[in-house]
Amino acid sequence: MNFQQQQQPYYADHATPRTAVEGRAKFIERTYIHLAGAIAAFVGIEALLMRSEAAIRFAASMMGSWWLVLGAFMLLGTVATHLAHSARSKPMQYLGLGLYVVLEAVIFLPILLVAQYMSGPQSNIILTAGVTTLATFAALTGIVLATKRDFSWMRSAIMIASLGALGLIVVSMIFGFTLGIGFTIGMIILAACYILYDTSNVLHHYEEDQYVSAALALFASVALMFWYVLRLVMSMNRE
């Protein structure tokens, strides 16, 4: 989750309407190619980690020190996002995107191992959650691209909702209670709002050389939705 997207409408100096449209189309194409690459890299890294005994032992140790893991993730995630959004050089932007993908893969490892253990011959929890997430992402993206609506007005609302959700997570850790299925559904809705917001920024607000930053923002939103869709499917499978 991040709020460093450009908020000024896109325009191209000294460009004809046709060249401006072509440039924007090329930017959108590059953004989604990079997003697909980030998702593919995440899947590949996760597949390797789930086959590594050392990684599995590390994931088990993460469950006992979640505060430390959460703090490190937030810190390094902020650094990665800053690199992708603020660095002038493309290599540093790619470093930020790559670092964020690796961090997400590490953070997801424990829950994916549990989901794999819970899956049976007739119910592949990870596959179900992945397909549901991608289908929802495609539908929300289609809404923005078809209507061309600008959802940047959602920025303040999703910021407040995100801070409230983080507060609830911290309080649940302190007092040892479990956030229920209602919270999970609420977070899926919040992730959907992020996707609408980020996609609208891709369409209207990013500059044409910011496709790496745009891909990172979209990847972060997809990862957020996947996490909570996975939790929802796991909850339904238990019942």
Image: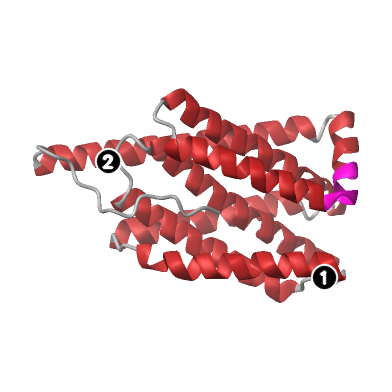
- Image side of residue 218 versus residue 25, left or right: right
Magenta residues (range) = 60-66
What residue does disc 2 label? 25
Q: Answer yes or no: is residue 12 visible.
A: yes
Label ID, residue 215: none
The mark nearer the N terminus, 2 or 1, is 2
Near-viewer residue (102 or 19): 102
What's the residue type where badge 2 is placed?
Ala
Badge 1 density bin: few <14, some 14–19, many ≥20, Cα 10 Å: few
- Image side of residue 85 versus residue 132, left or right: left
Residue lying at 41% horizontally and 25% vertically, measured from the top left: 89
What's the residue type where badge 1 is placed?
Thr
| Front tag of 2 and 1 | 1
- Image side of residue 192 versus residue 15, left or right: right
What residue does disc 1 label? 178
Tag 2's secondary structure?
helix
Query: Where's residue 149, x and y in %?
Result: 30, 63
Quarter that holds the C terminus: bottom right
Farthest bottom residue?
182
Any magenta on residue 65?
yes
* Magenta segment main secondary structure: helix
Quarter that holds the N terminus: bottom right
Q: Are marks 2 and 1 in contact (CB under 8 Å)?
A: no
Query: Where's residue 56, x and y in %?
Result: 87, 37
Query: Where's residue 238, x and y in %?
Result: 85, 66
Residue lying at 44% horizontally and 32% vertically, measured from the top left: 87
Compute the Cα span from label 2 to label 1: 45 Å
